Image (cartoon, rainbow, N blue to C red):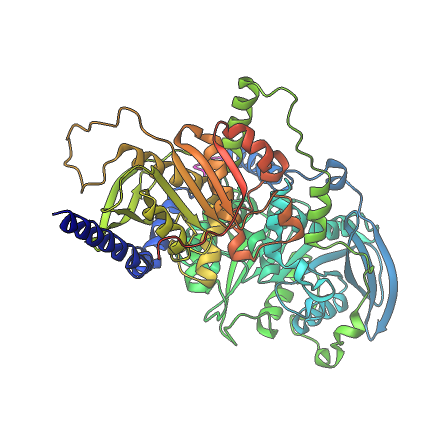
Amino acid sequence: MRNISILAVCISSCLLHAAAQATRSAIDPLLKQPLQSPVLVAEELRQFMVKRVPALPTVSRPEEWQKEAERLREHELSVIYHGWPREWVEAKPQFEKVAEITRPGYRMVKLRYEIVPGFTSTALLYEPEHMTGKMPAILDVNGHGAGGKAVEHKQKRCINQARRGILALSLEWIGMGELSSPDNEHNQIGLLDLAGSNGVGLFYLAMRRGLDYLYDDPRVDRTRIGMTGLSGGGWQTMLLSTLDTRVGPAVPVAGFSSLTTAIEHPDYAGDAEQNGADMRSVADYAHLMALRAPRPTLLIYNAMDDCCFRAGVVKQGVYTDIKPFFALMGSPGNLQWYENENPGTHNYQIDSREQSYRFFDHAFQLQASDKEDADTDTEVQTAADLAVGIPATNLTVVGLARQLAQSIHHDPPAQVDASWVEKQRQQLREVVRFAPVTVTHAWPVSETHEKGLESRGYRFEFSNGLSAPGVLLESTVRPQNGGTTLLISDSGRASMLVETGNDVDRGQRVLVFDPLLFGENLPGTGDDLSGLAQMVNTVGARPLGLDAAEVAAVAHWLQEDVIDGSGTPGARMMPPSHPAPLRVVTNGPRGETVAIVSAAIVPELYSSIEARHAIASLGDLFTHPLDYHDAQVVMCLDLYRDFDFNTLGLIAAPVRIDLAGKDPEPIFW
C-alpha cells in the first residue's frame, strides 16, 4: 500500500509538471488570437468623434453673427496660443534682408526672420520692378513638399503677382525646404504639447509673422492684403485668414475639409498641426470658413485629387454649408467655388493659378490680364539659387521643445497632505480629460478549458461607445492564491507571453489587455491610424485619458468577479465583500504612463504597478523621442508641464510603483 501511495504521488506530480510544460504552447496562441478588427475600432472612433462635431451657429441677423464670430476668434486664438509666452506672441516682426536678385519685371529679396527666439525661418519678397503709391500684397504659403518655397508652381505665381504690381511674400514652411529636418517633422509638435505649449501655435506664429511684416511695410495698402497656398498652404490660408481680419481676399487651394468629412475620410485629416489639441472642439473649420464672411474668398479644389480633399467630397462642408453666412452678411457672391479638372490632381498649376490671378485682380481692382506671362517657365530658379541660409545653431521643433522642457521642474512639497493630493488629482483629470467609463458588456469571443488552463477572450464594450480586447487566463491545477494581475504592453498582448505564463503558474488570474491604440486595438494603419488618433485630440478628448479610463473600467470589472458568462439583465449581483486591488505590470513607456495616470486618479483599484522597459521621467521623451505612432498616447497637452512620475506616484499613493522592472525569466516551462 505504501508503494502504491508513493506511486500515486509521483504520477500526480508528473501530471502537474506535464500540465505546466504544456502551458507555453497553450498560452501563445491564446494571446495571438484575433479579438478586435481595425474596421470596428475605426468605426467606433468615428462614432465617438462625430457626436463631438460642433454645430454651426443659428443666427438670423448680421450683428448676431459678428458678435459670435468675434467670440469664436478669441476662443480659437486662446487655444492656438495656449502655453506660449506672451512676449513671444506679441513680439514685433524681425526680418533681415540678406540679398537681392534682379529679374525682368521684378526682383526677389531674400529675407530671414525670427518665428520665436532661436528659431529662424526664411522668405522671399517678390517686388514689382516699378513701385508707386500704396500697393496690394499677397502672403504666399506652401504646403508639404521637399522644395519648400522653391517649388515650381509657387515661384510662378509669385513672379506673376509681382509683375501685376503686387508685393508677394513667399514664406518657407517648417519641415520643408531650408527647414527640412527630421527634428522639424510636423508630428514632432507633440513634444511641444507635452511641454505645455500647443504645437499648432508655432505654425501659426510662423505664418503670422509674414502677415505682420506686410502689414508694417509702408509701401503696402493695408486694405488690400491677400493670401493663398496649396495643400498645407491651403490650410494655412484658411486658418490665418479666418482668424486675422487683416487678410482680405483669400484663395485656399485643396487644403482642408470640415471635421465631419475628415472623420469620414481620415486620410484627409492632415498632419498634427492641422489637428492641434482642442482646435476643433468648439469651432470646426466650417465655422472658421464662415468667419470669412463677407471678405472675398475663392475655394479651389480638384476634381480627382490624388492626395486628399477631393472636390466632390469636401464641397458640402466647406462651401455649400457656408454660403448662408455670406448671404447673411449681404455678400453672397463673395464666396466662390472653382473645381479644377486639368489636371484635376493635387495641384496649383496654370489653370488654378490663372483663376487666382483673375480673382485677385478683381479684388484689388487691378487692370491686368488673367493669363500667366509666356516666359514664366524660364524664370523658375533652383532651390540653391533661392537659398537664404539659416544659422547652424537654429532651433528645430524638437530642439525648441527640449528647451521649454528644461525650464520645467517637478518638486513635490515638503509635506504632502490630502488637500494637495486632491488638488493635483483634479488637475490631472483636467489635463488628460479623464471621463470615467464602465464595462457595459464583456462580449465573450472565445473560451477554452484544457491542459490545466482556462481562458476567455473578451471584447470589452465601454459606456462611451469604444471597446478594447483582452484575454483572461487562470490555472485550473494551481491554487487560486495569487490575486489578479493586469498586463499591458506597448507591443500588444502577444509580447506578454512570459509574464502571463509565470503569473498563471503562480496561481494568479491574469488579464492581458490592449487599451485604445495598443496592440490589436488600432483603427487601421498609416493615414487612418494617424488621422483618427489626432482627431481624438482635436475634438477635445485625449487618448491618454481614454486609455486611463479603460484600464480603470476593466480593473473594476475584474474586482466584481463576474467572469462566469454573461449575466441576465436585472439579475442581482453579489459583489465581493472585500474586492482586492490589482497588480499591474506594463511593458514600455506608453503602458507605464497609462497605468500610472489611471492609478493617480483612482488609486483604490490598484495595489502595485511594475513598469518594465520604462522611462524614469517623462522628460526622457524629449531626449529620446518615440516614433510618432507610438507617441500619440503620451503626447498629451500640459502633461509634463504639470506632472512627472515622481509627483504622479505621490498622488497614486498607497499604490506601490516600481519603474525598474526587469524582464522575467520563464518559470513554467
- Residue 59: in magenta span: yes
- Residue 507: in magenta span: no
Write down the quadrant of residue 90 in the picture.
Answer: top right
569 displayed left or right of 367: left
Residue 601 in percent (x, y) is at 47, 31
640 displayed left or right of 534: right
User: Quick one: 130 or 137, which is closer to the camera?
Assistant: 137
User: Quick one: 202 or 467, which is closer to the camera?
Assistant: 467
User: Quick one: 129 or 654, which is closer to the camera?
Assistant: 654
User: Quick one: 526 or 173, which is closer to the camera?
Assistant: 526
517 displayed left or right of 23: right
Q: Is residue 147 above or below residue 324?
A: below
Residue 313 in percent (x, y) is at 41, 61
Residue 353 in percent (x, y) is at 62, 69
* Residues shaded magenta: 57-61
Task: Give me the residue at 46% from left, 46% from top.
Answer: 586
Residue 355 in percent (x, y) is at 59, 67
Find the residue positioned furthest to the front. Answer: 2
Task: Give me the residue at 59% from left, 21% from top.
Answer: 416
Can residue 73 be seen by looking at this rendering? no
Q: Is residue 431 above or below residue 369?
A: above
Find the residue positioned furthest to the left. Answer: 1
Can residue 76 be seen by looking at this rendering? yes
What is the quadrant of the C terminus in the image? Answer: bottom left
Q: Main secondary structure of the magenta part?
A: loop
Task: Give me the residue at 49% from left, 32% from top.
Answer: 600
How many numbered circles are shown? 0
